[in-house]
Image: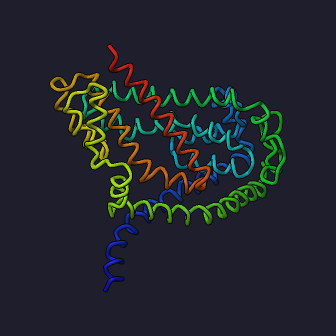
Amino acid sequence: MQSVESLATLWPIFVEVLPRVARIAVLVAVGVFVANLAVGFGLVEYVAGLSKYLTRPANLPDEVGTAILTTAASTTAGYGMLAEFRESGRLSDTATLVAVTINTFFGFVQHIFTFYAPVLIPILGLRVGLMYVGARAAISLGITLTGVLAGGILLSRADARLDDVPTGADTDATVEADGRGPAEFDTPETTRAVIREAGEKTWPKLKRLVPRLAIVYFLVTALVETNAAVWLLERTTGVQTVTDVTGSVTGLLGLPSAAVPVIAVFAFDTTVGAATIAPLIGGAFTPRTAVATMLVGGIVSFAVSTFKRSIPFQYGIWGARFGSKVVAVNTALKIVFIGLALVVLLVP
C-alpha cells in the first residue's frame, strides 16, 4: 500500500521531468553535432568573421564564435557546443567561464522575440515595457562586455590558438589559409565521413549527459513539489515566506508597500507579475519604481529558477564541480548588474 502511495506521489514528477529532459537532450545533441560539423568542415573561419569582435579581444578560439551565435537561437544548443569544445580540449575551464559570460546577451536576444516583444510589452504598455526590456538588455550587455574584458585580462593569446594544436579531436579538421577546408572535403565520400564522425562523437556525450540530467532534475523537482526545499529554507534561515524577504528588500530600497505582493508573484510567474503591476503604474508606482520593482522581482525569480532549473541544467551539462562554478559566476554577475541598474533607477 505504501509503495502504491509513493508511486502516486512520484509519478507526476516523472511526467513533468521527462519531457523537459528530452527537450534539453535534443537541443544539446544538436549543439554538439553542429560543433563537430563546424570543426570538421572548417566552417569556423566563416563564423569567425562575424564574431571576431567578441572572441578575439577576449582571447578565445574562433570556434567559440559558433557557440555564441548559436546561443541567440538556442541557449541550450549554445551551451552544448561550449561543452563539446571544453571536453575536446579547445577551451580551458577559465576560457569556458569567459565564453559562458559572453553568451549572456545572446541568450537574452532570443527572449526579445519570444517573450518580451509579444507578451511583456503589451501587458506593461509601450513606455514601461521598453524601459524594462531596455534595462534587462543593458544588464545582459554589461555582463557580456565584462566577459570580454575578463578574457582580455585572464586569458593569453595562446588560449585563442588552442584550435591550432592538433589533438585527437581536431586532427582531421585542419583549415587552409584561404578559409576553406581541405580539398578532400568537397567530395561526397568525405562529407559523409565528417557527418558520420560528428554523429559518433555526439552519441557518447548524450549517454553520459542524459542520465545525469534526469537524476538531478528529478531530485530537484521532487524537493520543490514536496515542499522539502521550503522546509529546509525555513529550518536553516528562519525565513518563513517569500514576503519576509521582499518586505525587507523593498523597505531598504524605498519602494512602495505595493511592491511586496508584486515581487512575491514575480518569484513564481513573470507574466502574472507584470499583469499584477500594470494597473498600478501611474498610481502606486511611477515608471521608474515599477521597473525597479520588476527587477527586484527578477532577482527573486532568478533565485527560484536557479534552484529549480539552472542548477540541474548546469550540473547536467558540466558536472557538479564545474557546473557550480558556472552557476556562481552567472549568479554573482546578474546580482551585481541588477544592483547597478537599481541604483540608476532609484537614485535621484
Q: Is residue 119 left or right of residue 339?
A: left
Quadrant the C terminus occupies: top left
Q: In this view, does 9 lie above or below 299?
A: below
Residue 287 in the image: x percent, y percent? 26, 22
Q: Which residue lies furthest to the bottom in this view?
A: 1
Q: Which residue is drawn at 39% across and 61% down?
A: 223
Quadrant the N terminus occupies: bottom left
Residue 179 in the image: x percent, y percent? 77, 35
Please count the marks in the image: 0
Front one among 80 and 239: 239
Which colour assignment does the render follow?
rainbow
Q: In this view, does 342 lie above or below 307?
A: above
Residue 185 in the image: x percent, y percent? 78, 49
Residue 57 in the image: x percent, y percent? 68, 26
Q: Residue at x 24, y 28 (%)?
A: 125
Residue 37 visible: no
Q: Which residue is drawn at 79% across and 34% down?
A: 158
Q: Is residue 250 above or below residue 35?
A: above
